[in-house]
Amino acid sequence: EQQTLDAQCTTSGGILGGHFALSLDGVRTNNVPFDVLASDLKSQLENIASLGTVKVIRRTNINAYQWTIVFLDRLGNVPLLDVHDHLTCSDRSGSPLIFVTETAQGTLPRMDGPYAGEVELDALDYTGGDDLIVHTIGGLMRGMPYHLRVSAWNGAGESYGKTQYSAPSIMVPMDRPDPPSSIEMSSIDDVAIQISWDAALVKGGSHQIAKFKVELDESSDNAHAQFEDGTESFDVENTPEVQMIVLESSADDMGGMFVVHFMGESSSNIYIDSDAAQIKKALEGISTIEYVNVSIFSHTQDSMTSYGQRWIVTFTSQTGNLPSILVDTGSAPPSTIATGGTLFGSSSIVRVEKISDGGLPASFVSPSILSINNTYTSRVFAFNGHSWSNPSTSRHAISPSKSSPSPPREVRVNILSDTEIGVSWTQPLYTGGDPLATYMLEWDSDAMFDHSSATVSHVSGLEKYYFVIKNLDPLESYFVRVMAYSAQGFSEPKMAVPLLSNMQTIDIELVDTSGTVNFSETFKVQVTTDDGFQRITNPISVYATSREVENELNTLGVIGAISVDREDRSSVFDSSNIETNSFDIRYAITLVGDDEISLSVNSDSLGPITAVVN
């Protein structure tokens, strides 16, 4: 059964407020606010005992709310929920409107599938003081979802009485998952060890492993630990997905808005100057997003020459490796990068990066409580939501020892001029046991890194670092990497990634000095990528708007994001030809993406008009 609850004002200018409640079978929920979150409405409905488990999805529009309620345990055709309305509208010319509709009628299981079965039980076998009857069903297929129902016969007539369907409505037979494999240990420093493993393929009938448990104990003979009552035990659970929405521009004039898409659903308009609470509300208004935390950081915190912000979005309730957020400014289909459309400002871009994938880690770093004088062995268990696996034990025992530091983090580069690059980074997560001394920066036009380097001293208490590489060749592209150094040696190098998007601006100028343009002229733009791939647009009118040029370039599908500005410099015809072109249209085309792009103009249908690309 699926029902939909809608709440809105009858006038577009009204602002909804107040509260409401729902009831079924004579049982009523507590009052909930007009914009109640899906999870809170779910909790209230599940307090109605006859409903069991429900799923609630919330969608928002401009001052309108819709909740889709799916009944997971109450099977068959469920009566409509009753609404107790205490809503208000700020616009006195309108009134609040809230109603429930049935969008999918529930049906009862047919119980005639290929895995169906039945068994008759003699009630005399279950007589006694306890009314609870327990029966075990065997011979089921592991991992197959089953539904059960029970009916009784009292000896009168030829048929059983009414059927009671099971709650929960389905149950999956499961057993122990296989244990993890390939347990490995390595030293982080002289007081901590990292344990890593491979997850088992056979999960005991479950779709996924819910968590791991790591046990760490001292080993007396360098091979075997006792794993007794004093064993240290740690649960390893899902880590949240973290994504970043990056707003960037070449001047401090970015404005406008955009829409976020996630798993087929979209948000309301999100404005560039929104605060964290407003962004959180817009994202949680998407039915496919449950709860998120939002933090805002300015680009200027990186000491980089750029403008804009980074919105860090942490998914706090949905687990696993989630799909990317998509952004939409109306200039192209939703993507991980967008420009133009409802976004304005100097070369303004909005894009999405994944900071860390959500999911269940396959490694664990112990607390810094170990001793360099002891030897340790570890073992790991897997839990599928039903049973723990048998343990899998590390093949070797180790003692913690000092090691080289871990690599620097968040290593980013930004172009400051045609001869300078700014590099920023954050100190390593682990020092390896000895104090950090310096950072080594290397840069080269190829990945051999045998050209140039520089050293930056580590400063105690300072987390973020910055360095400017100068006197570079304007015609070369450079690789940059950073390493941390301590008395134990260098860390693994960390390659730098651009802080801002790869951006090009190409101008197309259409000029006529004869005064004979007849409005029918067209041109085509050919796009060539750095690997030689070419596409050409449909004919474009010489009077095309910036949006029309954007749309034609977007249809080629080879450019990440496109923004077009149009300037009409035409003037009254003057035979002197000195800055008096009777037709002079200029398109400034900003291209954002990973590839270097070149543009050329097919002028076969331009007539007297000359096209210049620069």
Image (cartoon, rainbow, N blue to C red):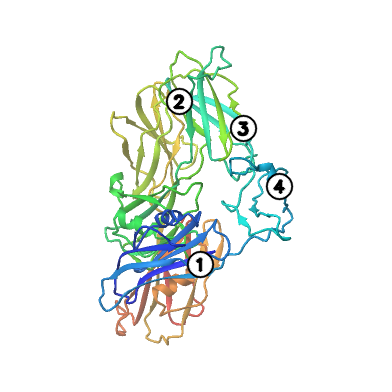
Locate the N terminus by quadrant: bottom right
Mark 4, Cα crowd under 10 Å, few <14 / some 14-19 / many 20+, is few
- Mark 4, secondary structure of its residue: loop
Mark 2, Cα crowd under 10 Å, few <14 / some 14-19 / many 20+, is many
User: What amino acid is at disc 3?
Assistant: Pro
Q: Which residue is mark 4?
A: 121
Q: Which mark is residue 79?
A: 1
- Mark 3, secondary structure of its residue: loop
Mark before the other along the chain sequence, 2 or 1: 1
In the displayed structure, 506 sits above or below 386; it is below
Cα separation between marks 2 and 1: 60 Å
User: What amino acid is at disc 4?
Assistant: Leu
Q: Which corner quadrant of the image does residue 203 belong to?
A: top right
User: What amino acid is at disc 2?
Assistant: Ile
Mark before the other along the chain sequence, 4 or 1: 1
Mark 1, Cα crowd under 10 Å, few <14 / some 14-19 / many 20+, is few
Look at the numbered discs 4 and 1 and tell me whether their residues touch, using CB distance below 8 Å.
no
Cα separation between marks 3 and 2: 25 Å
